[in-house]
Image (spheres, rainbow, N blue to C red):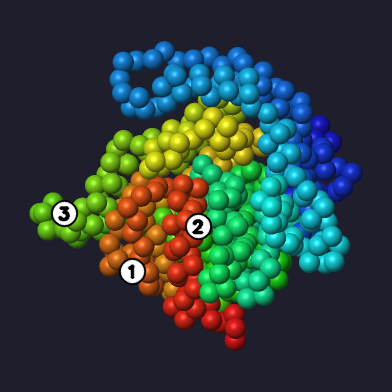
Amino acid sequence: MAIFNFLKKYLALGVTVTSLSVSVLADSNFNANYGTSPAPFKVDVHPSFINRTIQKVALTRYTVDVEEPDLASGPPRHNVTTVRDYWLNHYDWFRVQDQLNQRLFARTLGCIEKGQGVAPMDTDGLGRYHHFTTSVLTGPRSNFTNPVPLHFVHHRSNRTDAIPLLFIHGWPGSFMEVDNILDGLLSPPNASAPAFHVVAPSIPGFAFSPAPLKAGWGARETGYAFHALMEQLGYTHYVIQGGDFGGVILRYMAGDNPSAVLSVLDNMWIVPPNATDLQRYSLGLTTADENTTIETLNAFDSENSGYRLIQETKPLQAAIGMTDSPVGFAMWIFNLMINAVDHYIWTPQEIITWSMMYYIQGPYGGMRFYKEVLREGGFQAFGLGDAFPYVHQPVAISEFPKDIWYGTPLDWARRKGNVVVRNVHNTGGHFAAVESPDLLLGDIRAFWGNSSLSDVERFRS
C-alpha cells in the first residue's frame, strides 16, 4: 500500500523518474516519460491491455432494437455489430500504432540532440506525426502548482517566414484532427500563402496527456498549460486555431495572454441569443441568420445534447460502464460523430481509432472535461448565459452548416470579440479540419495571409 501511495503521488505530480515510468503510468496503459523539456515520444500501448480490450469486444452484449428511425435514440444495433465485428476480425491496433510512430525517432531524435525540440517537415506524408512529451508549470494564476504532463505533436515548416500556430482539438476528437490540414499548413502551394509551424497538443485526459487526478482542471487551466508549452518551445508570439473545446480554450488563452496570442480563428464561436433576441424571435422580428442560430441551438438542446448533460453533471456514472466496454464507448462518441458531419462517411477503422484515443488511458478524463468547462462558465451559453471573456485580438470565425453555431450573425459574434472576418460555408460540419480541410485551409490562409488584419505583421517587427 505504501508503494501504491508513493506511485500515485508521483502520477498526481506529473513527475516521472525513468526507472519508475512504467509503474507510474500503469493505469494509463501506455509507456511514457514526461520530463522538464520536450523529448521524443513513441506511442507504446501495453499489449496486455490490447488483448483485454479485444476480449471485451468479443463479449459485447447487444441491446434490443425498437421499431424507430435509425439514430432516433442512439446508434442502432446494426451500427454496433458492424463496429464490433470489424474490431474483432480486422482492426489491428499495433498497425495503427506503427503508422503513428513510423520513422519517428529517425526524424525527431536528431533535432532533440541539437537542442531544437522540434522535427523537420515530413515530405512523404507517411508516419508524419512528430510526437513529443514534456511537463509544464501553469504559473501563479493556476490552481494547479505541480508539473502538468503533456503529449503534443510539433512540426516546423521549412519556410523561414512561417507563423507559429497552436491547433487545439475538441471532443470527441484528438490531436489527429490536424491530420488533413497539416501538410497544407506546413507547405502551402505558393509563396504568397502563409506557412505555419504547427503545435497540436493533447488536452489532459485525452490521447496521451494523462488526466489530472484532482478536480478543477478545465478549459482555462488547459490554456495556462498550452501557453506554457508554447513558451517552452520558444514561441513568444503565436496564433491559435480550434473548434469545439479548442474554440473554448483559445478564448481564455487570448484573454489571459494578450501580448502572446496575436489572433485566433475559431470554427465554433459560441455566442448565445440574449433575452432581447429571444423576445424579437417570439415576435417574428429576427433575421434569417438569427432564426437559424436560435432554431439550431434549440434542436441541439432538445434532441441531441443528452451526452452533454450527463458529462456536465455525472460523468463518472457513465464512465464506469464505458471504461469496461470498448464498444459501448465507441458508440457513445459515434452518436455525436455521425450527427455532426454533412457528407462525411465514418469508417469502422476511424470510429475505433478515435475511441482508442480515450479508451487507452480511460474515457473518464475526457468525459469529465465537460463538467469542468461548465464549472468555469464556458458552457453557460447553452443555458443562455454569457461567461466568455471578450477577445480583443483580431478574430476570424468559420461557420459550417452541420455545426450548432451555424448562422451566428456578425453583430452577435462581435458581442464577445473583435471579429473581423466571418466565413459562412454551405457544406461541412463540426469537424472542419477532418471533413472540410480545403475550406478551413482557405479560411486560414485568407485570414493570416492578411498580415495587418490578423496582426501577424508583428512577427516581422
Amino acid bearing label 3: Tyr
Name the residue located 24 percent from the left edge and 51 percent from the top edge: 292
- Determine which residue is flagged by label 3: 281
Residue 23 seen in render: yes
Determine the CA span between mark 3 and mark 1. 19 Å
Numbered label attached to residue 414: 1
Q: Residue furthest bottom?
A: 461
Residue 138 seen in render: no
Name the residue located 66 percent from the left edge and 24 percent from the top edge: 53
Amino acid bearing label 1: Arg
Amino acid bearing label 2: Gly
Q: Quadrant of the C terminus?
A: bottom right
- Determine which residue is flagged by label 2: 242
Q: Residues within 10 Å of mark 1 (few under 14, many from 20)?
A: some
Numbered label attached to residue 423: none
Q: Along the horizontal axis of the image, is 160 left or right of 83? A: right
Q: Nearer the viewer, residue 119 or 158?
A: 158
Position above or below: 223 against 347: below
Determine the CA span between mark 2 and mark 1. 18 Å
Secondary structure state at the residue bearing disc 3: helix
**Counting residues from the N terminus, which is met first, the one under dot 3 or under dot 2?**
2
